[in-house]
Amino acid sequence: MIDVFDLHKTLGTQEVLCGINLRITRGHTYVILGRSGSGKSVLLKHLVGLFQPDVGRVLIDGENIAGLKERQLGPIRKKVGILFQSGALFDSMNVGENIAFPLREAGLKDENAIQTRVAEALEMVDLTGEEEKTPDNLSGGMRKRVGLARTIVSRPACILYDEPTTGLDPIATDSINHLIRRLQKRLNATSVVVTHDMKTAFHTADRIAFLHEGRIYFEGTTEELRASTDPILVNFIEGRSGESD
């Protein structure tokens, strides 16, 4: 589904990505781990063309999207949906209108078809019947679910999750983790989850990449990560700074 070759990106004076190579297999969930500032979200934004690489290629279904203009990225973005950290809802629209927005933007005119698709998306995220609520009346977890419903209403082949559990309590976090796995199976979607949360990583991942200093320091299964004795990986998994008192 997604191939990344020798990806480099500098922001300001900092080289954030220093030669990333990835292969993300169709129908699987791939988790990108790393400390804050390690380049996780920057990498994710390259996968949908929000950032363009300084060097390297990003292939979606075999098509190199590096260097494409905004208009040329339209068909790619129908294949790849992204859930941003905040949910990125429009406060001036209710839940149903938020979810219907990408369908209307794509030119769908049939209101019955739009409402059917909105209802299906809400059912998939366990929010059936919540169309009339406004974003300011939603909890953090519900905002994430509505954002996810808006992402999947266009039926993308790949879903990108940018820190999907940030700011959520443990119960809401567990619920989102289960939802990621359930949607992968139900939609047969390829999922890419950027997170620093180990519970999310171990619950959702088929494979994990760990970013460190702009490079992929580790790539493998959850079992291989758990079994690692590398001090950088062990400290991250156990939440230790590695500094002595």
Image (spheres, grey):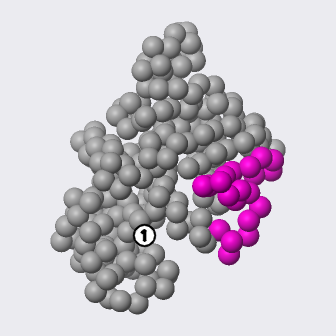
Q: Residue at x 60, y 40 (%)?
A: 23
**Location of residue 11 with respect to 222 vertically, above or below:** below
Q: Which segment did they paint magenta?
A: 52-73
* Quadrant of residue 169 within the rendered picture: top left
SS type, badge 1: loop
Q: Residue at x 38, y 69 (%)?
A: 153
Residue 22 visible from this viewpoint: yes
196 vs 204, nearest the viewer? 204
Q: Residue at x 57, y 37 (%)?
A: 36
Give the x, y percent position of residue 185: 33, 48
Q: Amino acid at mark 1?
A: Ser
In the orientation shown, which residue stands out farthest toward the left? 129
Residue 120 falls left or right of residue 90: left
* Quadrant of residue 37 within the rendered picture: top right
28 vs 214, nearest the viewer? 28
Q: Which residue is mark 1?
A: 154
Marker count (numbered): 1
Give the x, y percent position of residue 162: 49, 50
16 vs 110, nearest the viewer? 110
93 vs 6, nearest the viewer? 6
Asked if the stretch drawn in magenta spans residue 103, the answer is no
**Location of residue 11 with respect to 223 vertically, above or below:** below
Give the x, y percent position of residue 154: 42, 69
In the orientation shown, which residue stands out farthest toward the front? 62
Residue 167 visible from this viewpoint: no
Asked if the stretch drawn in magenta spans residue 68, the answer is yes
Q: Residue at x 77, y 46 (%)?
A: 56
Residue 75 falls left or right of residue 172: right
* Quadrant of residue 148 within the rendered picture: bottom left
How crowded is the residue under tag 1: few (<14 C-alpha within 10 Å), some, or many (20+)? Answer: many
